[in-house]
Image (cartoon, rainbow, N blue to C red):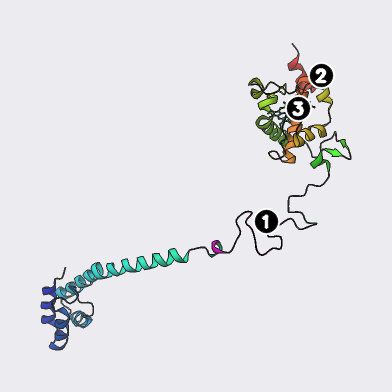
Amino acid sequence: MGTKSDYKRLAQQVCHPEPFGYAQDKLREGSRGQTCPERSRRILRCAQNDTSERLRRRVYQCHVFRFSSLHVHRLWVAAVVLGVLLASGCRQQMADQPRYNPLAPSAFFADGQSARPLVPGTVARGQLRDATPLYTGKSGAAFVDTFPLPVTRAVLARGQERYNIYCAPCHDRLGTGDGMIVRRGFRRPPSFHLDRLREAPVGYYFDVITQGFGAMQDYAAQIPPRDRWAIIAYIRALQLSQHATLAEVPAAEREKLLP
Ligand code: HEC
């Protein structure tokens, strides 16, 4: 590493008086405390013209030193400035737009409310609840007895999952009405295997889930319409599981059931 006196000697050796004088001036004690003064390029240029190996090494050392002290310091400053710029530049301007908190009052709208009613005659995408059996379980005033959507294996699997979550706590997994909540004192629901409920149309079940029934609350908020139908399809499967005749079992499976 070149020290101040090394560098001075080097300058004296290789440079003619004019640049030396300039360099000496820069190298004076207390000139910013740098071993290689920042602007003594003339000395470097002068030294670079010399071809001797020793001089080349000195000049290289001087460069290394310059980089390792002064430049590293500058890099730090640059990094901090860049960091500050980036941190402030990345702020999302969209977050600062004017907006209302939910249900806050508004001086802009005539009725003083920021929450706006639906525009008459419009329906939000995916929000259409028309008076079809899919959403009412009824056709006119009568409960429908056919499913308004195709009942597939996937629908049944979904229904089983939803039933076990929302209905089994009271109606139990088989539908006999002996769920855990009932065992702890809640009113006992009728079994789904009663003739009355086996014969009830599917639309009736949809109505019970949507409106509630007696002591049973409604599940309209928790269970979307298609899931209600899936649950009903699964209840039908449960009912069938307890009331099928041997003739209804596929021939290939029948053998297995016989003693
Ligand atoms: C918190 C317990 C509870 C849960 C959960 C529950 N039920 Fe019920 N359910 C009852 C009770 C109690 C009754 C009987 C109400 C009465 O007679 O007052 C009943 C009655 C019924 C009936 C019979 C109505 C009739 O005509 O007798 C059906 C159908 C029914 N529930 C379906 C469901 C379905 C489907 C679910 C799941 C989405 C469900 N219940 C979830 C407690 C529950």
For mark 1, what is the residue?
A: 115
Amino acid identity at mark 2? Thr
Question: In this figure, which residue is indicated by the disc labeled 2?
Answer: 245
Label 3 vs label 2, nearer the camera? 3
Residue 94 in the image: state x and y as whole percent. Answer: 56, 63
**Residue hosting label 3:** 237
Alpha-carbon distance for marks 1 and 2? 58 Å
Q: Nearer the viewer, residue 53 or 73?
A: 73
In whole angstroms, how far apart are the C-alphas of marks 3 and 2?
Answer: 14 Å
Q: Quadrant of residue 113?
A: bottom right
- Name the kind of residue labelled 3 in the image: Ala
Q: Secondary structure at mark 2?
A: loop
Q: Is residue 248 left or right of residue 61?
A: right
User: Which residue is drawn at the image coordinates 19% and 83% (left, top)?
Assistant: 46
- Quadrant into which the C terminus falls: top right
Q: Which residues are magenta?
A: 95-118
Residue found at x 76% / y 58%: 119
First in sequence: mark 1 vs mark 2: 1
Q: Position of residue 148 (x, y in %)?
A: 81, 39
Residue at 20% across / 77% down in the picture? 37
Q: What is the spatial separation of the Cα atoms under label 1 and label 3, in whole angstroms?
A: 45 Å
Q: Main secondary structure of the magenta part?
A: loop
